[in-house]
Amino acid sequence: MSDATVEKAQVTVEDFFKVAKDRLGLDLVAGSSGLNRRIEESAINRPGLALTGFFQYFAPRRIQTLGHAEMAYLASLTEGERRERLKQVFMRHIPCIVVTRRHRILPELLELAEEFKTCVLRTPAITKNFVNGATIIMGNLLAPHMVMQGTMVEILGVGVLLVGKAGVGKSETALALIKKGHCLVSDDVTALRVDSSNDVIGSPVGVIRYHMEIRGLGIIHVPSLFGVASVRNEKQLDLIINLCSPESISSEDRSGQMSLKRSILGVDIPSIEIPVAPGRDVANIVEVAALDQMLKRLGHDAAKELDEKLISVLAKDEKADE
């Protein structure tokens, strides 16, 4: 499982609008022909000084927001001045303009939106709340990401990605865990991205969200069978478990002290290998592995603690022999 070449996503105004439409109450007012324009930075810009004609530090690659102060300033100008000031902003090839607080859209905005093929959106949110929400959305959309073969589950708050060859039993193991009360994040294919805290976040992909393919049974819809509490929209990745054949497991370290890690998007994730064989309850082993990972995060490592006890006992025996 090696990382492919990872690049930042190319996010368009349409991508942002689809995600933010319900969360931030966005409406598309004008300039629909500009939906394919790219947004290249996650920060949101308020073009206060730009409206006065000062563009030295203007950030044209960001979403532009007109809040209460900007709209009040524009209202104080004559119609000709207002159009000229707004035109100077549109000429910088901005991605889009968002008017907050559901202010009345100025006629000049509508005309310039169509002329420059630039979207004008409107939201009922106050400017501060829109900026905060839109920044988070854009940060997620622009974050480095990749898609991996694997089934992801949440076990008592621990995000576990099950990987392995096709047919090894990833989906069946996940189904057994769901029946035990744990949650499905994604089946077979998992989207991974890095958030602002440098944590890897896993989520389902597109139309297969919340569906599982079980060999011999077919496709099932998990929340319909087990309830809405049995699925998660996304989860931080804490552990990767490779389900493999017993022959591929190294016999050099049976104590678990050799700490394996796999690099995902530049972040090292703890990894273990679990052999799959007839009669083994793999779901139970995966559940215990998740609990053990939780203990390790709290500072308790059973293998190291036992090793330290054995060393202490051997040291006492050596002293007694002397």
Image (spheres, rainbow, N blue to C red):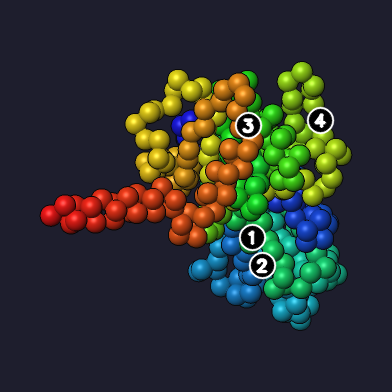
- Figure quadrant of residue 105: bottom right
Secondary structure beneath dot 2 equals helix
Q: Residue at x 74, y 46 (%)?
A: 181
Dot 1, crowdedness within 10 Å: few (<14), some or many (≥20)?
A: some
Tell me the residue that label 3 is attached to: 281
Q: CA distance from mark 3 to mark 4?
A: 22 Å
Total number of numbered discs in the rendering: 4
Q: CA distance from mark 1 to mark 3?
A: 41 Å
Dot 3, crowdedness within 10 Å: few (<14), some or many (≥20)?
A: few
Secondary structure beneath dot 4 equals strand
Tell me the residue that label 4 is attached to: 220
The image shows residue 281 at horizontal and vertical percentages of 63, 31
Q: Is residue 4 left or right of residue 120?
A: left
Q: Residue at x 71, y 45 (%)?
A: 182
Give the mark nearer the N terminus: 3 vs 4. Answer: 4
At label 1, the amino acid type is: Ile
Q: CA distance from mark 2 to mark 1?
A: 7 Å
Tell me the residue that label 2 is attached to: 132
**Residue 39: image tag:** none
Dot 2, crowdedness within 10 Å: few (<14), some or many (≥20)?
A: few
Tell me the residue that label 1 is attached to: 136
> Badges 2 and 1: C-beta atoms under 8 Å apart?
yes
Dot 4, crowdedness within 10 Å: few (<14), some or many (≥20)?
A: few
The image shows residue 259 at horizontal and vertical percentages of 39, 43
Q: Residue at x 60, y 75 (%)?
A: 49
> Badges 3 and 4: C-beta atoms under 8 Å apart?
no
At label 3, the amino acid type is: Asp
At label 4, the amino acid type is: Ile
Instruction: Please say if 139 is above or below 129.
Output: above
